[in-house]
Amino acid sequence: MIKGDRDVDTICAISTPIGTGGISVLRVSGPGALLIAQKSCQFLPKEPTSHHVYLGLLRDLSQSKPQSAGITDEAVDEVVTTYFKKGHSFTGDETIEISCHGSPYIAQKILTILVQSGARLAEPGEFTYRAFMNGKLDLVQAEGVLALIQAQSDRSGKQALRQLRGSLSKKLEAIEADILWSLARLEVSIDFSTEDVEIVSKTDLNQRVLAAQQGVNKLLESYRSGRMIKEGLQLVLAGEPNVGKSSLLNLLVEESRAIVSEIAGTTRDLVEAKFSVQGIVVNATDTAGLRKTSDIVESLGIKKSYEAISDADIIFFVFDINRGLSAHELGEIELLDPYKIRLIGNKKDKFSGFLDSAKKTLFDQLKVLKNFQKIENFEPFMKSKVLFVSAYDKSSYEDLTGLIALDLSNTVFEDQSYISQVRHFENLTKAAENIERALLLITADSSVEFMALELKEALILVQETLGKRFDDQVMDRVFREFCIGK
């Protein structure tokens, strides 16, 4: 956990990934950044110009030896150094960035020199934490930094960049402004409760609180899409043993990711792989076959299968088209969310019957299941969400990814701000409840004190989301996933 009493330290870290590369970048930030860098980068002027780049030899003066061929033995590397004055850097503090050749040894050597010169090793996320504490970013933007670092697709990168540039923050600030406007007038009404003066009309108050409610609800509605863009679509392949789930996973990811065998129960643990459909990462999970077993290890795998199924956005329930759905498979399907299920009849290459007849049999079996009776239009489900495929037929790849694309097309992905963090969703869900109660109190002409109390709670939650109110627990939750050097 980053401690506030260490904010006066000058911190340093390697900001580029570990490993050999073209360059490595080290960052030094804090009140003594320039003085510390000048000890080893003596080519830096006494008063450098902000955002200017300086080239020279970085030296380890603790290893001073006689000169040889114009270069002393204490020279470590020829580096490019950039200076950012206080108030004009990412963190808001005086900052030096040193770009050296991308040898892990050289980068670590320079880091050691900086520590010996008076800097402290930065903790994970401490540079971004300082940017937040110095008012360069709000908490939502700080989370956008991490989201951008972790982005796995074009859509997730764009969403994270919008968040970093303040798009989501502006929407939250608009909600905050509507609540503050309403709350201020309610507070004045309380102060002048003995006077026969109408501070704010019920209509105006209702409109502003409604505007806040609409803003919160719109962001809550964006959570599923936002989470999907950020984390990817969760696809689970489920079904009995030996129906071809592992083969279908290999087909989807276009490599031999899962072990395939004729022996039932080969897959005993979750096998995960990623691929992309329409710019969205799909996190595919092959699961252990669903069946009763006395094998302890296989039982643990089946338990994990059910856990993965419960967290899925889409379930590919795979069965062998040659034998149709068994009573056990129908029982498993009965327990699943019908809106998440896609029925995949595998081994079409070995099927000798008529596909229309097989689909008619499925129709008759499914329509009597209680959970499928919840589906308003069962026939369209049978037409669009039931596939007969072969894991060894390349055309089946297009059919399966097309089925996923159909789901994605029904999910709204616009160039707008989404919420994707659980913290945002939790806070705004609670705020929505407070706002809803405030609106009911306004409609009922209840006491303004009660209205104000509900709106105060909603305001606190919105401000906590933005980071205008925070504690160590919130800071730890936000910054614990950051890497060192960012």
Image (cartoon, grey):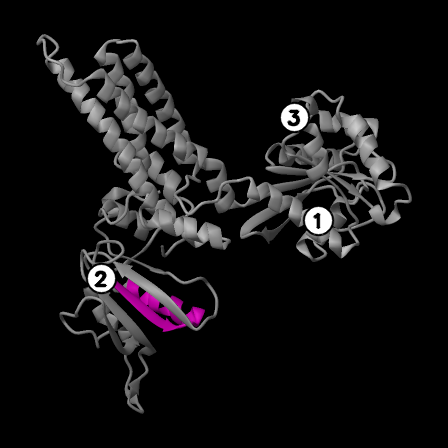
> Which of the two residues, 272 or 418, is positioned nearer the viewer here?
418
Q: Residue furthest right?
A: 352
Q: Is residue 338 above or below residue 414?
A: above
State if disc 1 and disc 2 touch (CB < 8 Å): no
Q: Amino acid at mark 3?
A: Ile
The part of the chain drawn in magenta is 96-115
Q: Quadrant of the N terminus?
A: top left
Frontmost of labels 3 and 2 is 3
Instruction: Report which residue position mark 1 lands on.
Output: 399
The crowding category of the residue bearing disc 3, from other C-alpha atoms within 10 Å (few below 14, some 14 to 19, many at least 20), is some
Q: CA distance from mark 3 to mark 2?
A: 64 Å
Mark closer to the chain start, 1 or 3: 3
Query: Residue at image x 61%, y 43%?
Result: 406
Q: Secondary structure at mark 2?
A: helix
| Residue 463 seen | no
Instruction: Report which residue position mark 2 lands on.
Output: 33
Question: Which of the 4 image quadrants contains residue 56?
Answer: bottom left
Query: Residue at image x 15%, y 15%?
Result: 189
Instruction: Report which residue position mark 3 lands on.
Output: 375
Point out residue 358 in the picture as x, y percentages from the top left corner. 84, 36
